[in-house]
């Protein structure tokens, strides 16, 4: 049941952001009413997912700018390509951002971190639905080899080593260059895949 609710929340958030991206692409700044109508949700629902309209506009702008590169990387995957190679392509595409996209990403993190958390927010992701979709797509070849718990843990762990938060730690905490940070994300992502599959093989040979 919980997994179903999480999936529904992701779909709702995606609908809101995608509607905003489409409206922005027409050359005008949409209103909350415009977004709600385009996404077929209420104004209240928009504000449940995005406490400030600025947060929604930034999220949509980041998506419009960064999404094509990642989706091109995922589309280049060929049948039989191993999951580590797919994950590397995804990670490199996600970590290669322009200064403008990085600035927007930092603003998005600040807006979501600074927002007051309300009880109704529990379990509702504040950002990152695209990241989870991209990770799940890259990891698709190994889905059948992992049970549901191991799959979710791998996807969540992967979300910690690619994306805005990882980029900021690499630059601000570790003092790495952009290329060093990118290589680190790739190494961490590959290591997680390898560890998850090794654990799954061990469990299949030595069931409890």
Image (cartoon, rainbow, N blue to C red):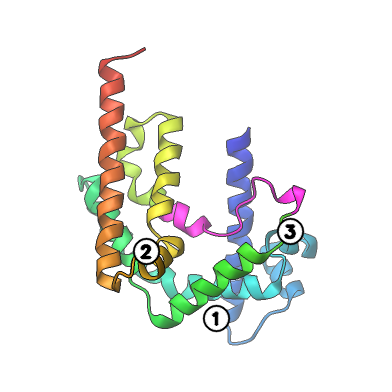
Residue that mark 1 sits on: 25
Q: In the structure shown, which secondary structural element does the residue marked by tag 2 occupy? A: helix
- Horizontally, residue 148 falls left or right of residue 126, namely left
Relative to the observer, which residue lies in front, 52 or 140? 52
Q: What is the span of residues highlighted in magenta in the rendered image?
A: 118-134
Q: Is residue 198 above or below residue 98?
A: above
- Horizontally, residue 71 falls left or right of residue 43, namely left
- State which mark lies toward you, 3 or 1: 3
Does the residue at mark 3 contact the one at mark 1 (Cβ under 8 Å)? no
- Horizontally, residue 121 falls left or right of residue 180, namely right
Q: Residue at x 45, y 45 (%)?
A: 156
Mark earlier in primary sequence (3, 2): 3
Residue 122 belongs to the span the image colors magenta? yes
Mark earlier in primary sequence (1, 2): 1
Mark earlier in primary sequence (3, 1): 1
Relative to the observer, which residue lies in front, 120 or 28? 120
Q: Residue at x 74, y 64 (%)?
A: 47
Residue 71: give its label: 2
- How far apart are the alpha carbons under marks 3 and 2? 28 Å
Q: Is residue 43 above or below residue 148?
A: below
Q: Position of residue 151 (x, y in %)?
A: 41, 36
Q: Residue at x 24, y 62 (%)?
A: 183
Q: In the structure shown, which secondary structural element does the residue marked by tag 1 occupy? A: helix
Residue that mark 3 sits on: 48
Q: Position of residue 96 (x, y in %)?
A: 33, 71
């Amino acid at each position: 049941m919980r997994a179903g609710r999480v999936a529904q929340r992701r779909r709702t958030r995606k609908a809101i952001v995608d509607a905003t991206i489409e409206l922005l692409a027409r050359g005008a700044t949409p209103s909350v009413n415009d977004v709600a109508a385009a996404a077929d949700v209420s104004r209240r629902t928009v504000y449940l997912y995005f406490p400030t309209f600025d947060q929604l506009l930034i999220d949509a702008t980041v998506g419009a700018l960064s999404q094509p590169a990642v989706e091109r990387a995922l589309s280049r995957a060929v049948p039989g390509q191993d999951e580590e190679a797919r994950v590397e392509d995804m990670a490199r595409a996600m970590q290669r951002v322009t200064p403008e996209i990085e600035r927007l990403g930092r603003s998005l993190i600040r807006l979501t971190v600074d927002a007051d958390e309300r009880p109704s927010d529990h379990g509702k992701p504040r950002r990152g639905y695209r990241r989870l979709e991209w990770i799940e797509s890259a990891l698709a070849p190994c889905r059948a080899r992992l049970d549901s718990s191991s799959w979710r843990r791998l996807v969540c762990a992967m979300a910690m080593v690619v994306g805005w938060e990882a980029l900021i730690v690499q630059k601000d905490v570790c003092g790495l260059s952009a290329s060093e940070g990118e290589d680190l994300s790739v190494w961490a992502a590959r290591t997680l895949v390898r560890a998850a599959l090794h654990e799954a093989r061990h469990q299949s040979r030595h069931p409890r």
